[in-house]
Amino acid sequence: MDFKRLVTGMVFSGSLALIPSLAMAQEPGQRLENAGARKVARGERQEAKGARQVGRGERVERRGERNVARGERMEGRGEALERSGHVAAGERLERRGERVERRGERQEARGARIVNRGERNEAAGARKVTRGVNQERTGERIEQSR
């Protein structure tokens, strides 16, 4: 039997497809341990992402607070302009101050939502890490018991 017929027979019978899976075969304990390690890495990444989100949310909140204060100042200046006789300019400045203030309030609310999302991500990441560590330990115990 020549080589060509042997290879085509292996390909069509499907036995060639088993070679990679046999090379990657692992003991049950080793498989658990590796899955736990991956889970720990994913959890740590999610925790870091949550921490970044919390920082970003706090920055957005602070920006919103500054905009609210800026809008209030603009409104005050607009009222002062109106009292001094510049009615049109004062009204324009007041309206602009109200818009800036509303935008600041929206930013504050958005920042709070981003912070909450970040805290949830941090907590979920911590849970994944602990589950992964437990899974790794279980895999080690199974390996040791063999």
Image: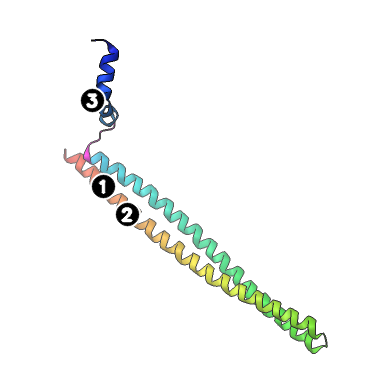
Q: Residue at x 59, y 69 (%)?
A: 62
Disc 3 target residue: 13
Identify the residue shown where x is 83% and y is 88%: 85
Marks 3 and 1, how far apart at CA: 40 Å
Residue 17 rendering spot, x and y as whole percentages? 28, 28
**Residue 130 numbered tag:** 2
Tell me if 76 is positioned left or right of 45 in this view.
Answer: right
**Which quadrant, please, contains the C terminus?**
top left
Main SS type for the magenta part? loop
Numbered disc in front, either 3 or 1? 3
Q: Secondary structure at mark 2?
A: helix
Q: Residue at x 82, y 88 (%)?
A: 84
Quick one: label 1, few (<14), some, or many (20+) residues within 10 Å?
A: some
User: Helix or strand or loop: what does disc 3 sit on?
Assistant: helix
Place residue 122 in its image quadrant: bottom left
Amino acid tagged 1? Arg
In the rendered view, does 88 fall on the left or right side of 20? right
Amino acid type at image mark 2? Thr
Name the residue at the top extreme.
1
| Mark with earlier residue (3, 2) | 3
- What is the crowding at mark 2: few (fewer than 14 residues within 10 Å), some, or many (at least 20)? some
Q: Is residue 78 above or below residue 116?
A: below
Q: Which residues make up the magenta segment?
A: 24-28
Is residue 90 placed above or below 54 in the rendered structure?
A: below
Amino acid at pointer 3: Ser
Task: Give the labeled residue for mark 1.
Answer: 137
- Decide whether residue 83 is among the magenta residues: no
Gap in angstroms between the C-alphas marked 1 and 2: 11 Å
Q: Is residue 92 above or below residue 16?
A: below
